[in-house]
Image (tube, helix red, strand yellow):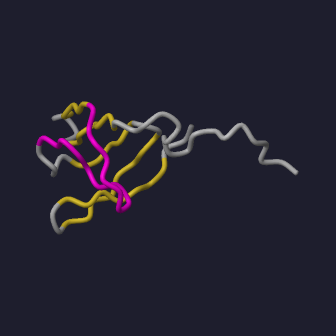
Amino acid sequence: MAWVEVTVTHGKKELPAMQRGVDLQLVNKIGKPTSVVVDGKTIKVESFVVDERDDIIQVKLDLPKGRSKGASDDQSAEG
């Protein structure tokens, strides 16, 4: 599964982020989140870790089963 560019809204700021399934990475500008708004959808945060070396936050999203972005639908992309 590849990383996908998404937008996280925090207050009035829109922050670029990268998402792969339930993993979300963005600059550490959102404090200690309990939920995040990703591309206009509010999603609960399962856990997070702040990487102080690069000043980013790595968030684990609490997505319902089968709702992870980029998940396989078991259908062939070929004709």
- Hey, which residue is sitting farthest front in the picture? 64
In this picture, residue 60 sits left or right of residue 33: right
Tell me what residue is drawn at x 17 percent, y 68 percent.
Answer: 12
Is residue 48 placed above or below 41 in the rendered structure? above
Q: Position of residue 73 (x, y in %)?
A: 66, 41
Q: Position of residue 14 (x, y in %)?
A: 26, 64
What predominant SS class does the magenta segment belong to?
Answer: strand
- Hey, which residue is sitting farthest bottom in the picture? 12
Task: Decide which of 24, 72 is in the foreground and name it.
Answer: 72
Q: Is residue 14 magenta?
A: no
Q: Quadrant of residue 74?
A: top right
Number of labelled discs? 0
Q: Position of residue 51 (x, y in %)?
A: 21, 33
- Hey, which residue is sitting farthest left in the picture? 31
Q: Quadrant of residue 75?
A: top right
In this picture, residue 75 sits left or right of residue 65: right
Image quadrant in which the N terminus is located: top right
- Hey, which residue is sitting farthest right in the picture? 79
Tell me what residue is drawn at x 30 percent, y 53 percent.
Answer: 42
Which residues are the magenta region?
32-46
In this picture, residue 4 sits left or right of residue 59: right
Tell me what residue is drawn at x 57 percent, y 40 percent.
Answer: 71
